[in-house]
Amino acid sequence: MNQANDTNGKKVFPKRWLWLLLAAAVCAAALWACTSLVASGGRLYWKGRQELDLREEDISVEEYLELSQALPDCRIRWSIPIGEGRYDSDARSITVTDFTPEEAPLFLFFQRLESVDASSCTCYGALLEAQELLEDCRFTWSLPLGEMDYSWDALYVRVSLDEIGIAELAELLAYMPRLRVVRLADGFPTQPELEQLQQALPELTFFWSVELLGETY
């Protein structure tokens, strides 16, 4: 290899060799990065890790999916965004606020979820969708039928017609998939109102009072 002499007669490497060595080092580093690191959401992650804790990071669902695809052998723990909250993907029990039906599939990202407290929620349709996806998870929530609250899985309800209208009642009863019997109390529903209920909810049995000769039966 040719060498140059400096002003003191010492032999030195030409600058072009230094640039070549630097370029080789950069290439080697780039090759290592390509084979050992993965980029996602503006961050770099080592491909060889077995577990990744991102629960303190506000990563999106898209970023999680991208990262889990790039690191198929890595167990990723993250905070799942549902409604206005974020929830530990490793949680066994969570308390949620209202969320949309489009967010219901996000419950599938939980790895060990056993129970969901949704007692403050009014997103009944979204809750039913989430329950259908997680059949082994216990959901707790209720519906206000007048002044009384009934669990979504009630088999029987007694409803005061002084406290709730027929249209609202029909809408709410549709969110109670296990309901079988409805007792209509404190009033006398008209024939059109009864037909409205029976047409909307044909699988339910309704009982109501009638007045004959001044007596209620």
Image (cartoon, rainbow, N blue to C red):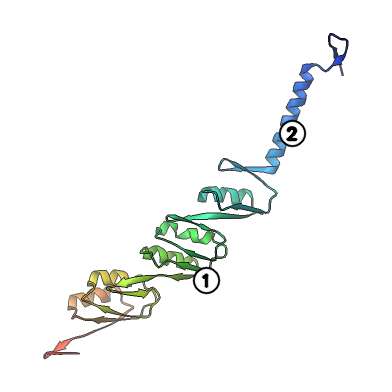
What type is the residue that disc 2 sits on?
Ala
> Where is residue 180, by image quadrant?
bottom left
Marks 1 and 2: CB-CB under 8 Å?
no
What type is the residue that disc 1 sits on?
Asp
Q: Position of residue 101 (x, y in %)?
A: 40, 59
In the image, is 211 to the left or to the right of 164?
left
Q: Residue at x 72, y 31 (%)?
A: 27
Q: Which mark is residue 58?
A: none
Secondary structure at numbered mark 1: loop
Q: Earlier in the sequence, mark 1 or mark 2?
A: 2
Q: Residue 192 versus residue 94: which sits nearer the camera? A: 94
Report how far apart the C-alphas of labels 1 and 2 lie in the structure: 50 Å
Q: Residue at x 21, y 81 (%)?
A: 186
> Where is residue 196, by image quadrant?
bottom left
Q: Position of residue 150 (x, y in %)?
A: 35, 75
Q: Can you say whether 208 is above or below 26 in the image?
A: below
Q: Residue 117 versus residue 30: which sits nearer the camera? A: 117
Instruction: Kindly identify which residue carries mark 1.
Output: 136
Q: Residue at x 70, y 43 (%)?
A: 36
Secondary structure at numbered mark 2: helix
